[in-house]
């Protein structure tokens, strides 16, 4: 037998082992991808779970994002949508003791008055409530405008109480979560989205008070 054939035969076990390892590795990668992009129907809303920037297990493989996301909203919402939801917003403001103009500002930033808005994280409705927040406040239908706004108003009220009526921190908490604000030492967390979100809501709030919000 030639020397080249002997070498080829000797290498067969190593090749077979490599193929088996690759097959199992592929299955493991497939399982990881399946876990990463698993759909759930929590609170009746299909959404992605275990996104890389939310799960520390994927920190090395997926380092690009580890911060909250904000749903893009129209620059100028439609007047008819504002008028449609204003009675609901004012009623929720009276119940919660939150300035209705602040609710308008948050809704404009979050959904642009689109009651059907849905983010990849499952944030839903006018105030873009996450399922976990909706559950905390007893929301049964995330896309019901009344339930959505009432729960969002109560959450804002609780955030204002938690942060001693510091509006900037309450808004940051609404976007990034109160835990993120506290871990940042009661400061606006250094998340790109949150750093853009807070001044945007404050500007919408100022504009609403100055009666030029929708100009």
Image: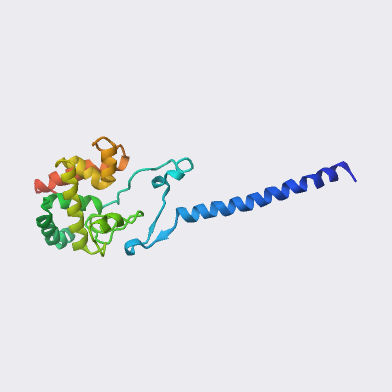
Q: Along the horizontal axis of the image, is 120 left or right of 147?
A: right
Q: Residue furthest right?
A: 1
How does the figure colour the protein chain or chains? rainbow
Instruction: Judge whether 8 appears above or below 147 on screen.
Output: above
Q: Along the horizontal axis of the image, is 86 left or right of 176?
A: left
Instruction: Judge whether 88 appears above or below 60 on screen.
Output: below
Identify the residue shown where x is 81% and y is 47%. Answer: 9
Q: Tell me residue 173's x, y (percent).
A: 24, 44
Kindly tell me whether residue 69 is visible in this rendering: yes
Identify the residue shown where x is 35% and y is 53%. Answer: 121
Q: Tell me residue 114's x, y (percent).
A: 24, 59
Kindly tell me whether residue 215 is visible in this rendering: no
- Say which of 210 and 29 sits in front: 29
Q: Tell me residue 96's x, y (percent).
A: 13, 54
Identify the residue shown where x is 35% and y is 43%. Answer: 67
- How many discs mark residues in the rendered view? 0
Identify the residue shown where x is 26% and y is 46%. Answer: 175
Q: Tell me residue 8's x, y (percent).
A: 80, 45
Q: Along the horizontal axis of the image, is 25 left or right of 138?
A: right
């Amino acid at each position: 037998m030639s020397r080249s054939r002997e070498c080829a035969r000797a290498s067969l076990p190593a090749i077979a082992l490599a193929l088996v390892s690759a097959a199992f590795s592929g299955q493991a990668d497939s399982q990881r991808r399946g876990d990463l992009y698993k759909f759930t129907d929590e609170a009746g809303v299909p959404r992605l779970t275990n996104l890389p920037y939310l799960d520390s297990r994927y920190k090395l493989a997926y380092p690009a994002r580890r911060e909250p996301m904000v749903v893009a909203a129209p620059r100028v919402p439609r007047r008819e949508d504002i008028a449609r939801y204003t009675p609901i917003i004012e009623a929720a403001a009276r119940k919660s003791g939150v300035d209705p103009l602040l609710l308008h500002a948050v809704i404009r930033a979050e959904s642009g008055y689109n009651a059907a808005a849905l983010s990849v994280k499952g944030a839903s409705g006018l105030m873009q409530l996450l399922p976990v927040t909706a559950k905390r406040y007893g929301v049964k239908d995330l896309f019901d405008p009344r339930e959505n706004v009432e729960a969002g108003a109560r959450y804002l009220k609780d955030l204002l109480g938690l942060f001693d009526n510091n509006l900037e921190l309450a808004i940051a908490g609404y976007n990034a979560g109160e835990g993120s604000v506290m871990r940042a030492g009661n400061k606006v967390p250094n998340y790109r989205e949150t750093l853009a979100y807070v001044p945007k809501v404050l500007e919408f709030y100022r504009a609403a008070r100055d009666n030029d919000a929708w100009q």
